[in-house]
Image (spheres, helix red, strand yellow):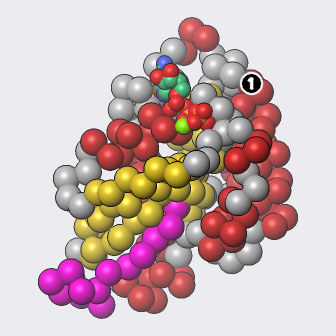
Amino acid sequence: MQLDEGKDLNNFRIIIIGSPFVGKTTFCEKLATNCQWNLDIIYKVGYSLYKRDDIINDHILKVDILNTLGYERYRRNMSEYIEDCDGIVLMYDITEEASFDEIKMWIDSLQEHKQGPFARLLLGNKNDIDDQREVSYEEGRQSGEKFQGKFLEVSAKKSDGVAHAYRLLLEMILSQEKKSMMVL
Ligand SMILES: Nc1nc2c(ncn2[C@@H]2O[C@H](COP(=O)(O)OP(=O)(O)OP(=O)(O)O)[C@@H](O)[C@H]2O)c(=O)[nH]1
Ligand SMILES: [Mg+2]
């Protein structure tokens, strides 16, 4: 498919998961502010949905990013979205070991329950406050490997690595076979 006056749009669904306070909303807000084109944000109880259009490799992508709340009680309705989504971002806070432990549980659970190809990105956030670090880069890297995805440390607050992480995720989604058959 070719870029054709906005007609051939490809819908990608991404979900961001992580403990409370790790920086998911800050990350999404940075994505929203550096979006040069269409952007809608829909706020609901328990989640917000960022809808943005991107051009990558000459293709228009319509991307829905579901920003979840970290609290357990909001998790109930996530499973359907997780089942259908094209990309999952797991985020922990490098200064909070408990948030990393939770991500390790998510990795095990996704390996067991999530079907089909999907892009996987593990983000260690808040690397601007390295002096408070509780999770080493190496531990993050190893979990990224276990997740069979990419691993990056970022600072959502300073917007450091945010655009790169997002681009990487879209490229991973595009290179998945089911999508690449449609758009590449
Ligand atoms: N130092 C630092 N602080 C950050 C960073 N990202 C987020 N924060 C701060 O961490 C706190 C929590 O950030 P949020 O983005 O609200 O976290 P969240 O993951 O959306 O939290 P819930 O919605 O409660 O699950 C805020 O005070 C942010 O300013 C970062 O990269 N570095
Ligand atoms: Mg939030």
Left or right of 139, for residue 13: left
Which residue is outermost to the front? Answer: 45
Mark 1 vs ligand 1: CB under 8 Å?
A: no
* Circle 1 crowding by C-alpha within 10 Å: few under 14, some 14–19, many from 20: some
Q: Is residue 136 part of the magenta span, yes or no?
A: no
| Image quadrant, ligand 2 | top right
Note whether 158 is above or below 82 in the view shown: above
Place of residue 28 in the rendered image (x, y in percent of width and height, measured from the top left)? 43, 44
Which residue is found at the position 19% from the left and 53% from the top?
Answer: 36
Q: Nearer the viewer, residue 121 or 32?
A: 32
Q: Is residue 10 part of the magenta span, yes or no?
A: yes
Place of residue 93 in the rendered image (x, y in percent of width and height, measured from the top left)? 62, 28
In the image, the segment drawn in magenta is 1-14
Q: How many numbered badges does the structure rendering display?
A: 1
Q: Nearer the viewer, residue 54 or 38?
A: 38
Residue at the disc numbered 1: 97
Left or right of 68, for residue 1: left
Note whether 55 is above or below 24 in the view shown: below
Disc 1 residue type?
Answer: Glu
Note whether 159 is above or below 64 in the view shown: above
Majority secondary structure in the magenta region: loop
Which residue is found at the position 53% from the left and 82% from the top?
Answer: 177
Which residue is found at the position 41% from the left and 26% from the top?
Answer: 157
